[in-house]
Image (spheres, rainbow, N blue to C red):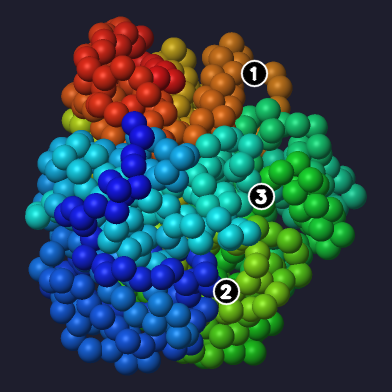
Amino acid sequence: MKYSLSLLAAVGVLSTSCSEKLNTTPANWERASVVTITCDSMVNYFTDYFPAATQFSELQPGEGLTLHGFDTETFALTTKKPLTTLKLKVDGEPATLVVEDTRVFKQDYWQFINTLYTTGYDKQQNALTLRWKGEKPAQVIALWQNQQLPAESVILADEEIVVKLPQVASSAKQRTHLRVYAATAERALSDVLVLLDGGKPVTSQEQLTRHDPETQILYSLMIDRFQNGNKANDWQYNKPEEVLPQADYQGGDIAGITQKIEDGFFQALGINTLWISPITQNPYDVWGQYHNPDTKFTGYHGYWPIYITKVEERFATDEELHHMLNVAHQHNMNVVLDYVANHLHINSPLFQAHPEWATDSITPDGRRNFELWDEFRLTTWFDVHIPSLNYEMQEVADQLTDSALFWVKNFEFDGFRHDACKHIPLNYWRTFTRKMKSDPALRNRDLWMIGETYGDADLIGSYIKTGMLNSQFDFNIYHTAIDVLGGNGSNTMRNIAAAVNESQWAYGAHHTMGNISGNHDKARFVSLAGGDLKWDEDAKAAGWNRHVGVGDSVRGYAKQLMLNKLNLTLPGVPCIYQGDEYGQEGGNDPDNRRFMRFDGYNRFEQHNLAEVKKFAIERRNSLPLQLGDYMLLHSSDTEMVFLRIYLGEAALVAVNNSENATDIEVEIPAGLKCEAGKRTLHVEGNDVLLIKL
């Protein structure tokens, strides 16, 4: 449909913003996080939204928002509306923060979220069109970067929304973003994100780059267990009476990763981002103790840092690390580094010089403060030889954030996977991100950060802001998905749908949360789904004391493949743990860290690998699957159907978690480039169907 200039200038039910000229140098080119209201009175840090800025002034709360005061660092808000704005000056430049009250979603995220979705782009009028599923919105707010578009650029009509794109966007040399937020009188709808290239929406895969985080497919690998590319750096403790082979070094190294990049392994799998395990120097002696069987451990995994700015010599030289990063970038791939900030090894020279930096190893009630993950999450030690650091001391945060930034200043990493985030106070993350985004040497680098936190959505989300982390792994979707697909308990596909809805309101509809197939701390899902590993079994003990296989191969591999397919189609960043692409079997640590296999696959593994490759390449070539809005169409005990929509293009995904084939009837919404109305989908048993509409 075409829109006349008179229509675009018409007065309707619009954003309450008055007409204003957009600034060509926005306060912060990185889009600022939404201010989410999760309790009655919220205190927020300015730098959580504008981490590189130094001055904040002229705060103007929108309708229904009460500003309870602000100082140089913080501001406090309450709201009576589901959606409003806070205008302010950031280093003298105008900016707008969107404020959403998300409390209503905590009560009913089982329900279908009111969905806002893009239906098209009118080149002649340079305008986007949008529709909604559910109740008609009463309010629309559109932002280019961090500036609200004037009221005359946003029109709410009877059946759709028209957003006129700003002319000033065409002069931007870098990627910019248009965001649209809408709300009924009771609740906010899901938000819309459109990437702009030269002021126009991205409309082809060729316009995307590895620096667009929404396009990532992440591959997690443990360096020592992946590929041995340089036998000259091989080392083992080699005393089986102290350390069993599973807990000793096995020879994987950075040169091996380079080999697999060069031979096309990752590209064939659709991977464009590698997450490599920690690379700081670990000890040469052995620590920890496991019983049944009795064994200690080497630091093959990398999580016991001794020298935090030195490359582990059993993995690489500086030159080999530089070469791997250069080869990755030549192959259009990112590399993010797993970094450990929570603790140092007890023999680290830095810790030896500052033993007062440790948190108290005794709780206030006299217990040993070890592995009390939730009760004393900010102080507990992981083990006696890796004391946690007291980041409530700012000098500790300053020293350790400088050490972390060493790795991106001296090596061309593309970001970080941060370990154990919930055990580290927020001031560390604010200090770290502010330094990174204020440093002239790093300011123009596209550095993306993902964290690891086990907990509820509120806890996980408290770390996800522009001034802290970009995202975290979505363990809540993962745990729900493996329970449902693997048959653990009474959960149904409705539970997965609800978990996805929860993530939509908690992290935004266009989050880059990591959807994982597994990780180095989890038992292999194929063994759980196939039944050789029991859900209530000690998975670590099983891995030590017997060979953990799959069990029912037909069921186990099918369920593993379903998990991978689901992750490759949901909103967020798919994350494949090494071996899960074909269905590596195993118990928990260290049995889930068996050395990677690149051949010798059985017929089930061959099938899984081929299907994962197909789905990954489909995702890499689909704008809806990478950038699209999410719309849930149907969920039942065994079924789930959803759409991913981008500018009217749509991909439909149907999941059948029963043994038998089924026909599912769904309603395709209006406004897409395909025919609207009822459609019947035939989905085979234990399968995920992907259709380009």
Mark 2 secondary-structure assignment: helix
Q: Is residue 90 above or below residue 170?
A: below
Q: Residue furthest right?
A: 232
Identity of the residue drawn at 58% across and 60% down: 172
Which mark lies nearer to you, 1 or 2? 2
| Percent coordinates x, y for residue 13 in the rendering | 17, 54
Q: Is residue 585 left or right of residue 636?
A: right
Q: Secondary structure at mark 1?
A: loop
Judging by the rendered image, the residue that carries numbered circle 2 is 437
Q: Which numbered circle lies on residue 601?
A: 1
* Amino acid bearing label 2: Lys
As drawn, 635 above or below 252: above
Amino acid identity at mark 1: Tyr
Q: Residue at x 42, y 38 (%)?
A: 122
Q: Could you say which quadrant of the image residue 36 lies in?
A: bottom left
Residue 326, placed above or below residue 159: below
Task: Tally the numbered discs.
Answer: 3
Q: CA distance from mark 1 to mark 2?
A: 45 Å
First of labels 1, 2 by sequence position: 2
- In the rendered structure, the answer to whether residue 145 lies left or right of residue 269 reads left
Q: Secondary structure at mark 3?
A: strand
Q: For label 2, count other residues whose C-alpha is less than 10 Å away and answer few (under 14), some (14-19) or many (20+).
A: some
How far apart in space, not on screen, are marks 2 and 3 (Cα)?
Answer: 19 Å
